[in-house]
Image (tube, rainbow, N blue to C red):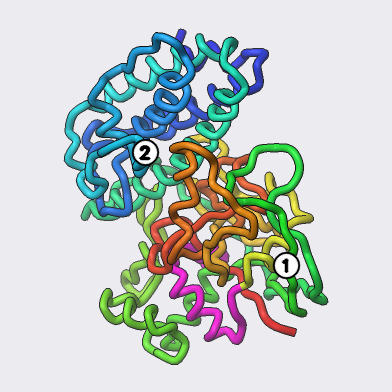
Amino acid sequence: MSAIRAVQNSRDPALRHFGAVRALTEALTEPLSDADATVQSMADASPAKWHLAHTTWFFETFILRDHVSGYALHDERFPYLFNSYYEAEGERHVRARRGMLTRPTLAEVRQYRAHVDAALADAMPDLPQSARTLIELGCHHEQQHQELLLTDLLHLFSCNPIEPAVWPGQRKVPVRWPGEMGWIEHDGGQVEIGHAGDGFAFDCEGPRHAELLHPHAIADRTVTNREWTAFIEDGGYAEPRHWLSDGWAWVQENGISAPLYWDKRDGVWTRFGLDGRRPLDPAAPVTHISFFEADAYASWAGGRLPTEAEWEAAASGHDAADGNQLDRAGPVEPRPAETGPAFFGDVWEWTGSAYRPYPGFHPAEGAVGEYNGKFMSGQFVLKGGSCATPRGHVRASYRNFFYPHQRWQFTGVRLAKDL
């Protein structure tokens, strides 16, 4: 019996959570060949094999190496290969060349995972609380990589001319049209945002603090594919007045005329997903759009992007476990499936707020302090999780962040407007 199977019925909730997270990662990569798991499609993406190894390196380094006396690394070469950006952990392989790592093989990486899983399961009962706290961080870190793994695979498979599906599935029933967009009004005033209370949160979600909101309204759902098609047909990608200067330059330089993975074939819009090329579902939330596109659409629609504080204030009364989120591996692709009042799932929602530290923020001590603090420049906050986010991973205070041109994640838009 594998170490993961052995711990899934453990009386220790931390060990059960660790086992569940590790098992889902294995299930997500089960359909992949060694070649599928090795290739890197762009510098922003990583090979599936690297995700499998990097998340394992995290547990081996920060828990087993640092807290288990006498632990010997599985392979002395792996820290150089599978460290991501932790300067405190020394030199590492160049990110853009991760796809050149034909060795170790996928099978050898899976052996690495099994070794670390077994060692951590054995060590868990005797670990200090500081190490158990790092295990919890490592589990949430791996959940982030589960989503990255899926979106990186989607980009990789989209680069293949035969457009293979990761999980071939039967044709899905179209999403029901959600009706006209409604608005949730807010009178303004002081609100509290940021993580508070018990339960896990990343350091960048705090401290909890006051924000002043002006009277505004936020849409009760995200923008749909049909609504986005109207933007395209009205010349939205060809009209510079709706675009930020950097956004318009990005459109011109890259020939952008539709969301990523859209293609018009025989007069019909289609999209590529983890289930292959399919006709576009008009009622599903638009996804794979950049901040630049989201902002331009909001301008065209007579609205704007919500601020992070506006979004969090509106979402705080909703259950973060609601909505279309990742519950298991295929065969059904974890794609946006319905649009509705839920603030969580389907697509990450761009806000107009820069990813900067909250008042009073201090990064954690040691190498793990690099986890979020070093990225607080030049990126924008997204909220709510997506169809590829593991259920139970997000909350209203959760802060995702990407550069304004990036759109290979499941990113969409919810409008706001001033009152």
Q: Say whether disc 1 or disc 2 marks the residue closer to the N-terminus.
A: 2
Left or right of residue 261: residue 199 = right
Q: Nearer the viewer, residue 177 or 89?
A: 89
**Foreground of the two, 370 or 39:** 370
The residue at 34%/46% (across/down) is 153
Whole-angstrom CA distance, mark 1 to mark 2, is 34 Å
Tell whether 216 sits left or right of 273: right
Range of magenta residues: 280-305
Q: Image point 23% across, 25% down: which residue?
A: 77
Question: Callout 2: 10 Å neighbours few (<14), some, many (20+)?
Answer: few
Queried whether the magenta region covers residue 288, the answer comes back as yes
**Amino acid type of the residue tagged 2 in the rendering:** Ala
* Residue 185 percent across, percent down from the top left: 78, 75
Q: Quadrant of residue 32?
A: top left
- Asked whether residue 281 appears in the rendered view, the answer is no
Q: Is residue 399 above or below residue 234?
A: above
Disc number at residue 211?
A: 1
Contact between marks 1 and 2 (CB within 8 A): the answer is no
Q: Secondary structure at mark 2?
A: helix
Looking at the image, residue 304 sits to the left or right of residue 261; the answer is: right
Residue drawn at the location 41% of the way across and 18% of the way down: 116
Q: Is residue 51 visible?
A: yes
Residue 258 position in % (x across, y down): 38, 73
Local crowd at mark 1 within 10 Å, few (<14), some, or many (≥20)? some
Q: Amino acid at mark 1?
A: Glu
Count of number-bearing discs: 2
**Secondary structure of the residue carrying numbered label 1:** strand
Residue 328, relative to residue 113: is it above or below?
below
Q: Which callout, 1 or 2, points to the residue nearer the camera? A: 2
Residue annotated with mark 2: 88
